[in-house]
Amino acid sequence: MRKVPVMSHSVGGLSEVYGTRLGMTEDSLELLERTRGSAEPWDLGDAKAGVPGLYLSCFDMLFTEDATWLVKVSEASPAPAAPMTHMEPKDEPEQCPVIDSQEQGLSPGLEGQEDEHSLEQVQSMVVGEVLKDIETACKLLNITADPIEWNTGNVQKWLLWIEHLYRLPNAGKAFQDLTGKDLCAMSEEEFRQRSPLCGDTLHAHLDIWKSTAWMKERCSVGETKTTGGEDLWSEADSSCSGQPIHLWQFLRELLRKPHNYGRCIRWLNKEKGIFKIEDSAHVARLWGLRKNRPAMNYDKLSRSIRQYYKKNIIRKPDVSQRLVYQFVHKV
DNA sequence: CATGAGGAGATCG
DNA sequence: CGATCTCCTCATG
């Protein structure tokens, strides 16, 4: 109900990947009866697929929606557009993601069909989700939303992140020493050359980020500009003060996004601040990603949590249970 | 066998 | 310097 994944083939492999992995609903499939690609080599085959819940959370993070607005784009704006630099003459005329989601109210006449209308609603909703999810990723990785600004370290983080989320084979090395700018200048073909296995997927992901950044830029022109513009992205969250994030803050961030991380960490009793780490390895990986500690594991993460006992930040609940902790103070 | 408690030195921003 | 990170020992279910 919440998400209405939509797919398009505008991003080659992506649609198939997400289509199959995201557990698309039948109706959404009908909605835009797109070609249903053949199953990707790495999906549904492995154990994870059997437990969609596990990594689905991550998928939602960026993608239930991405495809969506590509759909919108390809359907709504027939004109070949700009921000997507060189587009390959692939099967789809790749367009620039457009911001029309905002002003959909202005063009009611255009989409006479109910389908179109509901589709628009879905799309704008979905665009919002993309924004939120990318924002979340940015916080977790401590990188900016705009790939153009990434240094080589940021790029590596992002790659790790995407690979981690989507269970892609490791391709980090293939993009070593590239900045975000370099990355953004690369065509899908170049991506594929560097990483035959997942270059196209990575490229598609990057496109989403680029598009989102571009859109965000467009939307925020005029306002927020004076202050530096971080307001838009850092509104509701606490963890933004430039200081290095603390583990307890990180955990709270995860807990704050049950939709994305509910399968690896969740509240048992939010009022009392009691939470449970459902997937210790997963949480540890996320933390390691965030802190640039590839060797992070639950052993070490839990040691850090235990340090909080003395500081009165986190404690073990009265009835001690495995992997269950409790924030001492109110959230 | 994964988790939990906590000591102690190393490391990083 | 503080907040982990890392490694380690020992205990527990």
Image (spheres, coloured by chain):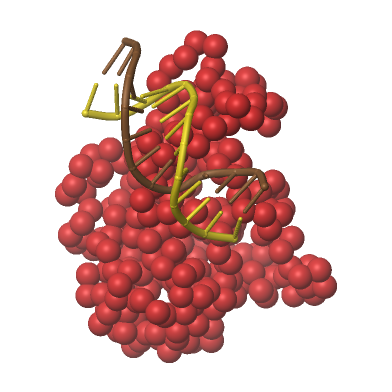
Chain colours: A red, B yellow, C brown
Q: Is residue A41 left or right of residue A286?
A: left
Q: Is residue A75 left or right of residue A42?
A: right
Nearer the observer, A38 or A329:
A329
Nearer the observer, A168 or A26:
A168
Does residue A199 appear in this view?
no
Image quadrant of residue A224? bottom right
The count of marks equals 0
Please provide percent x and percent y for residue A181. 50, 82
Nearer the observer, A60 or A152:
A152
Q: Relative to A299, does residue A235 appear above or below in the rendering?
A: below
Does residue A182 appear in this view?
yes
Nearer the observer, A135 or A325:
A325
Residue that appears at 71% across and 61% down:
A232
Q: Relative to A94, does residue A72 appear above or below in the rendering?
A: above
Please provide percent x and percent y for residue A83. 53, 83
Residue that appears at 22% across and 70% down:
A197
Q: Relative to A184, does residue A155 appear above or below in the rendering?
A: above
Q: Which quadrant: the C terminus of chain A?
A: top right
Residue that appears at 51% across and 57% down:
A141
Please provide percent x and percent y for residue A210. 52, 74
Q: Residue furthest right?
A: A226
Residue that appears at 51% across and 33% down:
A305
